Image (cartoon, rainbow, N blue to C red):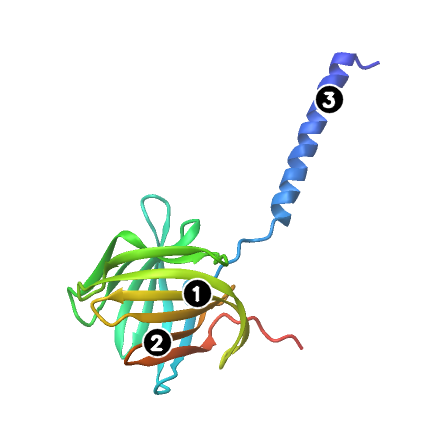
Amino acid sequence: MIPSSLRHSLSTIALVLLGAALNAQAEQAKPAAADFFPLHVDYSWTYRNTSDDSRFTLKVLKETKQDDGSIRYLVEMMAGVQIHRYFSKPDGWVLLHFEQYPEHPGLEAKYEPPKQYLQNPLVPGFKWKWNGKDYTQQEFAEDNTVAEFEEVTVPAGKFRAMKLVSYVTGASSPMTRTFWYAEGVGLIKTTTEAKTMSYGSELVDYSFKKPDKK
């Protein structure tokens, strides 16, 4: 016969193991957090400017681990000029650290502290503000508000996208910039409205689409 003290110990061990197993299952079943700004090496996006039908591309060139363990992402923009942007993705945010213009050595914009570029995941009703300087050292301010999901159709397809409205003031005329971000894809559409101008862009294609189901 097993002594009562041993039975009690075995029961305790069994409960601990069962709890650990249930916790592991819960972690596996937990859905991944929504990502409205996916960044992985070789991911690329092609956009069309609605004002003149010209194209520009974004591509993730490199991921670099920092001393603090975070990852810094280098994103190249090719739009007549070459622009390198460096992002990180701590919990709840996409941060922009600095921009460089490789064709113009020495021309760059650093953001210290890093610019809160985008809430991630985007949550309807959330607001945030940012003040700083652009690469010309002109002061400007952004007042951002996350709106709601909308169905948006662009050349790359139809998406359920979160709308973000940004009011920009500074050295130039005030403008309203609107962005639509789709979960797992990223930016799919933009519009900019100001007193003397109006333009925008639309996603034409991206490199990491899931294959169509047959």
Q: How many marks?
A: 3
Compared to residue 88, the image places residue 180 above or below, namely below
**Residue labelled with disc 1:** 164
Element on which disc 1 rests = strand
Task: Find out whether the residues at labels 2 and 1 contact each other: C-beta distance under 8 Å.
Answer: no
N-term mark: 3 or 1: 3
From the top left corner, tell me how far across and down residue 162 is, in percent.
Answer: 50, 65
Quarter of the image containing the N terminus? top right
Outermost right residue: 1
Give the amino acid at mark 2.
Glu
* Residue at 31% in and 71% down: 175
**Residue 48 in sight from this viewpoint:** yes
Outermost front residue: 195
**Residue labelled with disc 2:** 193
Mark 2–mark 1 distance (CA, rounded to whole Å): 14 Å
Give the amino acid at mark 3.
Leu
